[in-house]
Image (cartoon, rainbow, N blue to C red):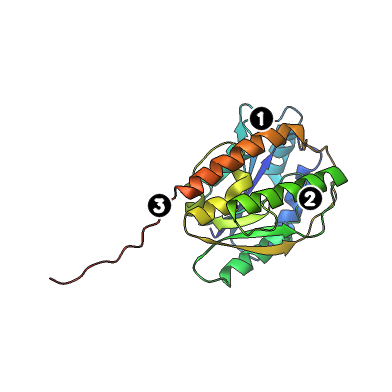
Amino acid sequence: MELSVVIPVFNEAACIRQLLDETRAQLEGQVHYEVIVVDDGSTDSTAAVLADCRRELPRLRVLHHRQCYGQSAALASGINAARAPWVATLDGDGQNDPADIMKLYQAMEQSPGDVMMIAGARRQRHDSWLRRVSSRVANRVRAALLGDDTFDTGCGLKLLPRAVFLSLPQFSHMHRFLPALVQRQGGEVKSVDVNHRPRQLGSSKYGVMNRLWVGIIDLFGVWWLKRRALRPIVDEVNGP
């Protein structure tokens, strides 16, 4: 097993099957992979759709949360269960293009050893004006405070070693700050331009007020963590 693809979903019955079919089409024959979908307590027919998918997609594994714990918890559950050393993540709403998974994987193979994450960057977004403006402001504030030098931390498409993710501090909403947390561990983050598609099916879970205040609190929490990171330079002494 070379690559685990982790997809967190919440009430995405309308689009998850198409996304899984696309993912299989892009990865089959390219890499030895598995796909892990984490159903974060969906209240629609997502669980039933995934049960049907499992019968037809042998590389698919499905995890269920008994209630909704949030995207960060769903990612953590999926990555904990992953069997491959490399993990790619993407959102379950179909706006991330599965064709970009191998683009990120190949970028990591060509990167120097200090690069610990390849982050997708959505240069041309297909979202509402409110979502685009909100994200632009949030990215600028985050970059100014954390200095993570990452164009688009909100993109769900990322690739990193499973061991690196498991070494990061785990908390709600931590998925928004993955580049800064990886840099806190001493790793470099490389951004790669990826496709972003309009949502075709289902409904967006995005809202300004349901993210604004927790985002501000988490931002200062991550700033605090970065300032207190311990990365001593160690020299081994040999001989008498």
Q: Position of residue 74 (x, y in %)?
A: 61, 39
> Of residues 123 and 163, which is closer to you in this image?
123
Q: Position of residue 18 (x, y in %)?
A: 79, 48
**Image depth: mark 1 or mark 3 in front:** 3
- Residue type for callout 3: Leu
Residue 229 drawn above or below residue 38: below
* Circle 1 crowding by C-alpha within 10 Å: few under 14, some 14–19, many from 20: many
Along the viewing direction, whichever of 79 and 145 lies nearer the viewer: 145
- Give whichever of discs 1 and 3 has the lower sequence position: 1
Query: What whole-number distance in Å separates the C-alpha atoms at marks 2 and 3?
Result: 37 Å
For the C terminus, the quadrant is bottom left
Crowdedness of circle 2 by 10 Å Cα count: few (<14), some, many (20+)? many
- Can you give x and y, in whole percent of width and height, for residue 171 in the image? 54, 37
- Numbered label attached to residue 98: none
| Residue 36, visible in the rendered structure | no
Please provide percent x and percent y for residue 75. Answer: 60, 43
Residue 124 falls in which quadrant of the image? bottom right
Task: Tell me if label 2 and label 1 are in contact, CB under 8 Å.
Answer: no
Q: Amino acid at mark 1?
A: Gly
Q: Which mark is residue 95?
A: 2
Relative to 104, 124 lies left or right: right
Rounded to the nearest angstrom, the CA distance separating label 2 from label 1 is 21 Å
Answer with left or right where residue 156 lies relative to residue 202. left
User: Residue at label 1?
Assistant: 41
The residue singled out by tag 3 in the image is 230
Examine the rendered structure and indicate whether residue 208 appears above or below residue 117.
above
Q: Which residue corresponds to the image point at 70% horizontal and 51% vertical from the top-left?
A: 139
Q: Nearer the viewer, mark 2 or mark 1?
A: 2
